Image (cartoon, rainbow, N blue to C red):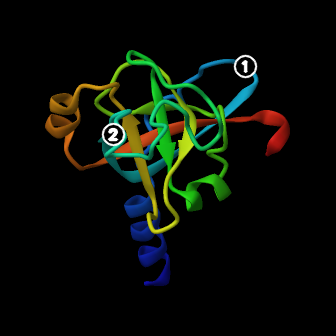
Amino acid sequence: MKILYVILLISLFSCENPKQKTPTFEDGFSWNSAMVTATAYNSLSYQTNSNPHITAFGDSLKPGLKYIAVSRDLLKRGLKHNTPVKIEGLTGVFWVKDKMHSRWRNRIDIYMGVNVDSAKQWGKKRVCIDFGLPKNQE
């Protein structure tokens, strides 16, 4: 009976389909997956701070860039500055370029330039992300 609970827990906390091949971005990365809550933000002072075009890591934000902010607990799981991330429902690779306030847990915030309507349309969703860790960090 315990093995059944273990299998159930693994299936609940994994968003990877075992029949699918792990996505590859570059040979230098090992890919992991996680279920997170995803919201969206804009580079506007009322959503961030008085300098909305500079991230917590010091990177410059410009509309059209595929950047995300991550909650600080995800930093500890390997989603550090410049980590490549694929987000369920969106195309392309996003890059960790910002970090969120410490009150947030298991969350990403997708950068949507200055288009507030796009951010509102995205809303808040549970999504699967795949993130690449350099193989030498495993």
The residue nearer to you, when weighing 132 against 46, is 46
Q: Is residue 4 left or right of residue 79?
A: left
Return the x and y of residue 68 as percentages of the image width and height.
47, 36
Residue shown at 60% from the left, 19% from the top = 25
Give 32 or 85, whichever is nearer the viewer: 85
Quadrant of the snapshot with the N terminus:
bottom left
Q: Residues within 10 Å of mark 1 (few under 14, many from 20)?
A: few
The residue labelled by disc 2 is: 41
- Marks 1 and 2, the one that precedes in the sequence: 1
Residue nearer the viewer, 88 or 110? 110
State whether residue 59 appears in this view: yes
Q: Amino acid at mark 2?
A: Tyr
Name the residue rendered at 37%, 41% in the picture.
Answer: 45
Is 82 on the left or on the right of 96, as rendered? right
Tell me if mark 2 has few (under 14), some (14-19) or many (20+) residues whose alpha carbon lies within 10 angstroms of its own: many
Residue lying at 79% horizontally and 34% vertically, measured from the top left: 135
Q: Secondary structure at mark 2?
A: strand
Residue 120's image quarter? top left
Quote the CA–CA distance across marks 1 and 2: 31 Å
- Residue 34 x/y as whole percent: 47, 50
**Up-down relation of residue 120 to residue 93 (above or below):** below
Residue 137, numbered label: none
Q: Which residue is mark 1?
A: 27
Query: Which quadrant of the figure contains the C terminus?
Result: top right
Who is closer to the viewer here, 3 or 30? 30
Residue type for callout 1: Asp
For discs 1 and 2, the disc positioned in front in the rendered view = 2
Q: Is residue 87 above or below residue 9?
A: above
Whether residues under marks 1 and 2 lie with C-beta atoms below 8 angstroms apart, the answer is no
- Reply above or below: 4 against 45: below
Helix, strand, or loop for circle 1? loop
